[in-house]
Amino acid sequence: MSNPAILHRPTARPDLRLVPRAADPTPAPSSAERNIPAGTAPRGFALYVGFDEAKAAASGVSLGVLVEALRRTLHEVAPDAETYATVALAPEGAGGRDVDVVRLALHEPSAVARTKPEIEVEERAEAGVVVDISRKRVLIDGESATFTFKEFELLQYLVLREGRTIERTELVSSLWQSAEAEEVPGERTIDVHVRRLRAKLGRFEDIVRTVRGVGYRFDRHADVVIRYGHGTPSPDRF
């Protein structure tokens, strides 16, 4: 991604339009349901799009065409909405997923936080928990815990959505989406997985908290360290 002027470059498909979906009868979740911090209110959103000039050209469009199509659609759905578009510039050859490179280039807070080195991780590991997403392992008091693949996936899913309560139905649909129908567990089977996960966390079991009647939430403690890697998946919050 090199030149912001791409936003004004003519393309072979200047009439590209995105058609708004029919109204969803399901009401949008409230601020409380999305765990908006107290004292704050939503004022808009940012949609990060990972799509470089070469990929856009191969699809017969440009970044400018996509921006204008999105703006037209937004204007049709919500005429009073204000918009601002910017191009994310990154060093040539920057590795990783396009969308993660874009988030970092635009200084999205959670993306930036993941690049900061943990302070004295090895020393702190002796008396706490390290959830090492980059290496897919968990250290408890300096020792590697024997988590199964699915147990780690479950913990990782909660960790990446820290502070948000995840319903059992979401855990099933997200963690078993590629499984055969007969292999997909019922919601109550999630409780069994969580119990096993907590048993292996030992005295730190309460970092996976039960929200009665809803699901589960990851609560970070002072003695818990999260190691992120460049390949860490980005949680979809909407």
Image (spheres, rainbow, N blue to C red):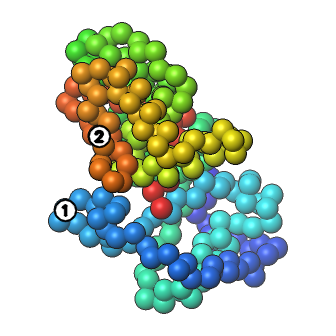
Q: Residues within 10 Å of mark 2 (few under 14, many from 20)?
A: some
Residue at 60% in and 54% down: 50
- Which residue is drawn at the image coordinates 32% and 36% (left, top)? 208
Residue 88 in the image: x percent, y percent? 53, 56
Looking at the rendered structure, the secondary structure element under dot 1 is loop
**What is the three-letter code of the residue carrying label 2?**
Arg
> What residue sits 43% from the left and 88% below the top?
80
- Nearer-the-camera pick, 91 or 52: 52
* 112 is higher (above) or lower (below) than 238: above
Query: Residue 235 location, x and y as percent?
Result: 48, 48
Residue 7's place in the image compared with 115, above or below, is: below
Name the side, left or right, on which 172 lies relative to 12: left
Q: Secondary structure at mark 2?
A: strand
Along the polypeptide, which appears first: circle 2 or circle 1?
1
Q: Residues within 10 Å of mark 1 (few under 14, many from 20)?
A: few
- Where 146 falls versus 102 (above or below)? above
| Residue 112 in view (yes/no) | no
- Tell me if label 2 and label 1 are in contact, CB under 8 Å: no
Write down the residue under mark 1.
Answer: 38
**Residue at point 53%, 80% (across, down):** 25
The reply, left or right, for residue 25 in relation to residue 128 is right
**Image quarter of residue 184:** top right
Q: Nearer the viewer, residue 73 or 94?
A: 73
Label ID, residue 209: 2
